Image (cartoon, grey):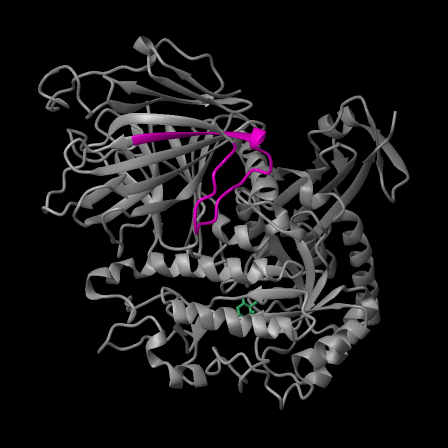
């Protein structure tokens, strides 16, 4: 395992536990892609790396009329030198020329994984957990060099890629496009899997057959977005949840991105992912470098389930940081859907008392506690307490809630400003805007220009002040609009297109400062629900509010789709009131609880309106979740039935040691006279006996997997869960 370099043939072979990724330097200069997939021995390059001149193709250089880049698989295509497929990089040199040729120079193989300066990225704790290859390419005519960095994790089938561009010349170079990964596949016999959506309907799964030409997903919204998640996979046509080949790509970035596949004239496929070149350019001065974000790449031969479990392991162990990476997350109650903006201290304390009485561990005060915020049309940016609502301030409220035996959490939306705010009146140029143009409002707010240092400093100091002057154990970091009229008063006219990426770098700087100086605070990111559910945010904040849609049925789709890339330990998931505020649907308290259990559990409803019977159910849920959270967040997840394929959804979790199991089954609509329904479990020890907790029954593993458990569900919106324990010996 590790990275092998065969000097004679100039072949790089990156190995993870079960996968190989192979490249070769052809003709001592072209870095070509050879293979990515199941782990193999280093192949015979004459067989594995075929070159062919195809009709109408030009040669790569006039010395050798047999070699064309029009056909071969490449590692970092430039769109020049006879490759007409989609390039990974576009630049304008000081002399106005645009031809980029990148030829192999040298390479370095190191143990471990270097950090990406200023950017989120997967990490290692010990050097021996991964190996890194850095390949240096350079333009033979202009003084531009490019470092391609590949890390292969030894125990996980993960390869990460990132790119650094260095201007070693004397004139500015304008980067117009810098992708982080480009992978050429020998065939296009794949389906494309993506996770599109909308507000309240995030990360639904789409599977389409590749066709000739470019098919892509992207965000131009200044956030990774609800509309398209920065995740994409290519799956063999016969790939299922449990079998088949799948290649996944996930961008560790929270802003504008592009990802896609080009199927070329000879039915090869080029997959790519990186910064969106829409409204992007970067002036790279002499001596300066540009670091592009990281792409996580996972190959699985065990279908989508295998792909997801690898990604879950990576994100839980090597992306999420801080105390709450490993500690159990508290059960929370959030006042948003209980009160919206209409609260005062008495109301909050009444809710908190009830929450504490039920066994809740963290009470979160959502939007409306600052400035003069009684609705969403003012005060963002003014992070001082609204005394009429909270006379004893945040510190006073937090202290009282602590007396009830709970932690206290607080909502912020630090990246925004309301036109009706003291901050905006004082600094009208601190928002993203274009002079002379309308400043389009969305939810009555504008986006602060985080490309500016003074804006970032303001955010760090005001938010830190609140966190440092009250006992706050949790922060919900919200972001409720996308960017329009892209422009910055802090950048000169030539650099205006740098603003969207500079914003993200600024955001990451702010997050790093606030999060690292408050190590005991649990941070949850949010963007109108799951509008920024991406690995970039998870690097700073271990959980994300999955969706503003809290309806249990809708959540089946959203959480199932989200789990394609992200583990349940990253998903905020709450029980809310019925009729549901987003969907109007009435589901049982049991189903709402069972759906929310497969995530970071909490409540988001008026606890004071519950009947005694409902409160009893809640107490039971809290006890149940306290048991589940000891293993579900770190367990292997198996999706058993997909909501996208029918009326039933099921998933299960098996602890890493195989001893603890949680399985959940959901029925959306009642099926009258359905016959006998069973749910077959998976990933159990066929020889072992399993106790079904609470049923006084034991079954053997093979029976649970081959015959299954009977599911009786009567009525619409039903659920059924099982807690199993493996018997010792
Ligand atoms: C959007 C979030 O997703 C909600 O949960 C809530 O915090 C509101 N913002 C508050 O304005």
Toward the viewer: 457 or 450?
Answer: 457
Tell me where residue 718 appears, x and y as whole percent.
70, 52
**Residue at the far right in the pictured view:** 696
Left or right? Give the position of 270 relative to 553: left
Camera sees residue 95:
yes
- The quadrant the C terminus occupies is top right
Quadrant assignment for ligand 1: bottom right
**Residue beneath the point at 32% across and 75% down:** 440
Main SS, magenta region, reads: loop
**Residue at the far bottom in the pictured view:** 388
Toward the viewer: 479 or 415?
Answer: 415
The boundaries of the magenta stretch are 112-136
Toward the viewer: 346 or 144?
Answer: 144
Residue 497 sits in which quadrant? bottom left
Tell me where residue 276 appears, x and y as whole percent.
31, 50
Tell me where residue 531 appears, x and y as whole percent.
47, 59
Q: Is residue 117 magenta?
A: yes
Left or right? Give the position of 184 relative to 407: left
Camera sees residue 221:
no
Is 52 placed above or below 328 here? Answer: above
Toward the viewer: 573 or 583?
Answer: 573
Q: Is residue 546 magenta?
A: no
**Residue beneath the point at 77% across and 43% down:** 722
């Amino acid at each position: 395992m590790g990275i092998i370099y065969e000097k004679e043939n100039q072949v790089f072979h990156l190995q993870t536990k079960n996968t190989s990724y192979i490249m070769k330097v052809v003709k001592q200069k072209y870095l070509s892609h050879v293979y990515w997939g199941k782990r193999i021995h280093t192949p015979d390059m004459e067989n594995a790396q075929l070159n062919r001149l195809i009709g109408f193709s030009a040669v790569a250089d006039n010395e050798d009329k047999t070699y064309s880049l029009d056909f071969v698989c490449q590692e970092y295509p430039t769109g020049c030198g006879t490759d007409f497929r989609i390039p990974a990089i576009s630049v304008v040199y000081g002399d106005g020329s645009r031809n980029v040729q990148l030829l192999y120079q040298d390479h370095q193989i190191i143990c471990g994984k270097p950090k990406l300066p200023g950017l989120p990225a997967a990490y290692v704790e010990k050097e021996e957990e991964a190996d890194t290859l850095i390949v240096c390419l350079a333009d033979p005519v202009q003084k531009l060099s490019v470092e391609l960095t590949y890390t292969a994790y030894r125990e996980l089938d993960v390869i990460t890629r990132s790119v650094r561009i260095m201007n070693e010349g004397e004139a500015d170079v304008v980067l117009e496009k810098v992708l982080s990964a480009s992978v050429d596949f020998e065939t296009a016999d794949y389906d494309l899997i993506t996770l599109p959506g909308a507000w309240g309907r995030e990360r639904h799964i789409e599977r389409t057959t590749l066709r000739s030409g470019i098919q892509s997903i992207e965000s131009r919204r200044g956030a990774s977005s609800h509309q398209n998640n920065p995740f994409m996979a290519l799956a063999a046509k016969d790939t299922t949840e449990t079998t088949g080949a799948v290649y996944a790509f996930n961008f560790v970035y929270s802003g504008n991105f592009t990802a896609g596949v080009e199927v070329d004239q000879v039915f090869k496929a080029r997959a790519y992912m990186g910064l969106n070149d829409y409204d992007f350019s970067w002036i790279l001065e002499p001596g300066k470098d540009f670091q592009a974000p990281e792409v996580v790449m996972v190959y699985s031969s065990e279908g989508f389930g295998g792909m997801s479990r690898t990604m879950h392991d990576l994100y839980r162990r090597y992306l999420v940081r801080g105390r709450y990476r490993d500690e159990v997350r508290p059960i929370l109650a959030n006042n948003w859907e209980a009160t919206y903006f209409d609260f005062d201290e008495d109301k909050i304390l009444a809710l908190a008392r009830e929450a504490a009485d039920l066994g809740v561990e963290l009470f979160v005060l959502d939007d409306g506690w600052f400035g003069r915020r009684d609705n969403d049309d003012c005060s963002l940016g003014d992070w001082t307490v609204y005394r009429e609502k909270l006379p004893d301030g945040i510190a006073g409220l937090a202290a009282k809630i602590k007396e009830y035996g709970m932690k206290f959490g607080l909502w912020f939306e630090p990246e925004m400003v309301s036109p009706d705010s003291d901050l905006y009146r004082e600094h009208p140029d601190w928002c993203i805007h274009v002079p002379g143009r309308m400043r389009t409002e969305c939810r009555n707010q504008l986006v602060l220009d985080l490309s500016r240092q003074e804006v970032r400093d303001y955010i760090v100091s005001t938010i830190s002040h609140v966190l440092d002057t009250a006992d706050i154990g949790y922060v919900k970091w919200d972001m409720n609009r996308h960017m329009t009229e892209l422009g910055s008063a802090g950048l000169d006219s030539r650099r205006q297109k740098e603003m969207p990426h500079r914003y993200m770098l600024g955001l990451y700087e702010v997050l790093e400062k606030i999060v690292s100086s408050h190590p005991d605070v649990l941070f949850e990111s949010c963007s109108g629900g799951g509008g920024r559910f991406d690995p970039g945010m998870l690097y700073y904040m271990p959980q994300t509010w999955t969706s503003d849609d809290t309806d249990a049925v809708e959540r089946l789709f959203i959480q199932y789709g989200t789990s394609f890339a992200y583990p349940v330990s990253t998903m905020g998931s709450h029980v809310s009131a019925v009729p549901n505020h987003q969907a109007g649907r009435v589901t049982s308290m049991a189903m709402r609880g069972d759906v929310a259990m497969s995530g970071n559990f909490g409540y988001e409803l008026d606890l004071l309106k519950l009947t005694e019977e409902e409160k009893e159910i809640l107490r039971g849920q809290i006890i149940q979740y306290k048991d589940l959270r000891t293993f579900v967040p770190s367990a292997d997840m198996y999706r058993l039935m997909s909501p996208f394929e029918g009326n039933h959804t099921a998933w299960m979790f098996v602890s890493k040691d195989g001893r603890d199991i949680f399985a959940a089954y959901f029925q959306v609509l009642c099926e009258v006279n359905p016959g006998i329904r069973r749910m077959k479990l998976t990933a159990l020890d066929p020889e072992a006996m399993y106790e079904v907790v609470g049923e006084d029954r034991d079954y053997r593993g093979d029976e649970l997997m081959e015959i299954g458990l009977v599911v009786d569900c009567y009525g619409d919106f039903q659920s059924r869960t099982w807690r199993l324990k493996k018997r010792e010996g």
